[in-house]
Amino acid sequence: MQLDLAKVDAILERYPADESSLVMVLQDVQSHFHFLPSEALEHVADRLDLPRSKVFSVATFYKVFSLSPKGRTVIQVCKGTACHVRGAQLLEDELSRQLRIRAGETTEDGAFTLETVNCVGACAMAPVVVTGQSIHAEVVPAKIRTLLKKASISSEKKRTKQTSDSFSKRMSSPAALLARSEELRSMWEAIPTKVVVCGGPGCLAAGALEVMEALQTAASEQRLPIETELGACSHDHSLLSLSGCQGLCQQGPLVQVYPDDIQYIKVKPKDASSIISAIIERRVESSLVGESQGRAQHPFYQGQVFRSLSLCGQVDPESLDHYLALGGFVSLAQTLANRTPEQVIELVDASGLRGRGGAGFPTGKKWRSAIAAAKAEGRPPYVLCNGDEGDPGAFMDRAILEGSPYQVIEGMILGAYALRAREGYLYVRAEYPLAVERLQKAISTCESAGLLGERILGSSLSFRLQISRGGGAFVCGESTALMRSIEGKVGEPRAKYTRSVERGLYDAPTVLNNVETWALIPGIVRDGAEAFAAIGTKRSKGTKAFSLTGQVRRTGLVEVPMGTTLRQLIFDIGGGVLPGRTFKAVQTGGPSGGCLPESQLDLPVDFDALTEAGSMMGSGGMIVMDDTSCMVDVALYFVRFLLEESCGKCAPCRLGLPQLAFLLTKLTEGKGTLQDIETIEAIAATMEHNSLCGLGKSAPNPVLSTLRYFRHEYEQHVRGRCPAGVCRELIRYEVMDTCTGCLACIKPCPENAITGEFEKIHIIDQALCSRCGICRSVCNFDAIRVVSGGEP
């Protein structure tokens, strides 16, 4: 078949004709053709004047790219940590069995391609499967057959645009912005009722858009004057808006009603009429209320202090008017009118802000180093935002980018003013298309409004901001690898003898902070350094956002003062582990972090205490595990993840990770020895001290922390037992006497291993059983147990 290269040319026309465009050009080519044809790669190489070897190198390095055609529907199994501990591997196995393909392959009829993805950022609804653009939450193996049927006949429903927010007139001065902000604030405060539908990742997966549409329809039918745009509201009109994440993801979709502070949970489209009736009659629809009527008294929200998430969950992320009404860009206007760049840096310095990306480096100190390097080089620094939230189990950055994009942009503009920068980049994961879409719209709106581009608000500040989409490589969360990716190169880290603040992007001085750090800047500038520094601990100031997921009652997005203990986070805010289970561990810091036992629950969550305990804070993922989680399996999970994501540049990481994976696999199969455990420790120590970048140096952390606190589990695996009942080679399923003989498990069993008659106890043939877990997922009487080793 002749390839239509005109389509490739049209894509190339949208980007600068240089190497920096390569990754995004290839993404768009793949989006059109559903893979990367060799003819297209050669054409891109010719048009960008690049060696073909370089283009093919990039195409084969980044996980998002495929050189083989994909099916009409791509099915992705999320393999993030939260999904893993809730059974993602069982879902992948069942999909492979029913489709008769492995992950990475396409069915013979071209209908389906099966893939795994590190994390889709909907961790609170784990385990998650994505079909096309549809996210399916809390999937169990027994649902796979139905899911495939729906995927084969469904047509993708395009996400509707919520607002048409635009500016036809630029704001020419700080005074003009402040006047506009005050006008919109007055309009906002005059609105009698505000109905806010949560549009966070978890709620979107649970059907928030359908709830939004149903509320609009119900309001029209019941003649409640309601608008979806702030600018269209008059004094007697209510406002219906879709916000970012409101936090309590486990109970979504959420609908919040202001000013009465009423929170409705698990709302379905059929509930819309009741909610609208309650608004008209000024009452509460009690059947849709959860543990508390509103946020103020809810145990999930008590103890939280919102700074980076201060507007996420309230503001319409696609409306600049809405952001201005809630105080957005006031910090920028006041700064351009009254502060020098040095005064902004002094505020950041005095606040004690440390980078929220994991390393915790003092932000003000980093900025000053970049300014000194820029003066020495005679060229302005670049300002970068790291939105490549690659840690499985973390979705804080996604929530902020999707829920309050203008807040991040304002933080970066303030940073550009302080640093005298003229150009900046937002580097965002390819797996976050909604974040990219909303950021691009926000950037365009800011350019029209005079908030980006030349002479911002009539001042001397000129700043251009662009989006660079990542290619699905975890290693690109490392600063130097990220910068190489923005340049259009393979994302390999470089040695740290030269710091990025001195020679970073395009060998220029560069400041890189993560999403949460930039989101905190406007509040620090607006409220003052003292207000921020008054929160937290002596060495860790302010607040920290976490994604609280795993085997915990209230999963969701939280923000707490630094120094809050793990116990407060997990048990007071999260509600503890699920009924009938016991707490085993909490994993913090992503693949670079560690697993901490119950004895460490009173540790304060800050940069130093977690590191001393053998873990780290990282970007903010926090996965709770109960007695059904196997620590050897968890260690193997992280090692396999890093093995797949390692760039392979340095020998300790390239050779050490496969050896760790081999030895841990032996243990999970009951073939390991005590000597293997000692060898694991020796390999981990070598990697820790000799790897080139942070990925390799911290890769042993999950292994070492589980050995430190759960060594007895490793030793039990040597004896052929998996106490948690996870490792398949060491377990068997048995039907208990509580079986009612309902026949529900017989037909779903893929191996025909279950036999029995109606109202008689069933039997599992151990020779046929593949331990896929479907029988347990369909049993309504909890009559199937997992037995390990010599357990009776």
Image (spheres, grey):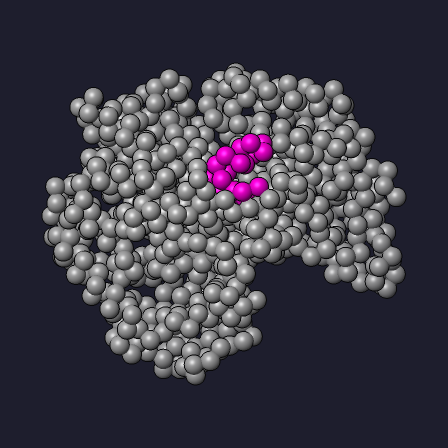
Q: In this view, does 279 lie to the left or right of 567?
A: left
Q: Quadrant of the C terminus?
A: top right
Locate residue 358, reporting x and y percent: 45, 35
Q: Is residue 498 above or below residue 714?
A: above
Q: Quadrant of residue 425?
A: top left
Locate residue 141, reporting x and y percent: 66, 50
Is any part of residue 389 visible from this angle? no
Is any part of residue 342 visible from this angle? yes
**Residue at 70% across, 54% down:** 777
Q: In this view, does 429 lie above or below 483?
A: below
Please report the bounds of the magenta region as a residue range. 603-623
**Residue at 49% across, 40% down:** 606
**Residue at 49% across, 47% down:** 546
Q: In this view, does 51 lie to the left or right of 116?
A: left
Q: In this view, does 536 lie to the left or right of 715?
A: left
Q: Front-most of 106 and 412?
A: 412
**Residue at 77% across, 57% down:** 782
Locate residue 686, reporting x and y percent: 58, 17
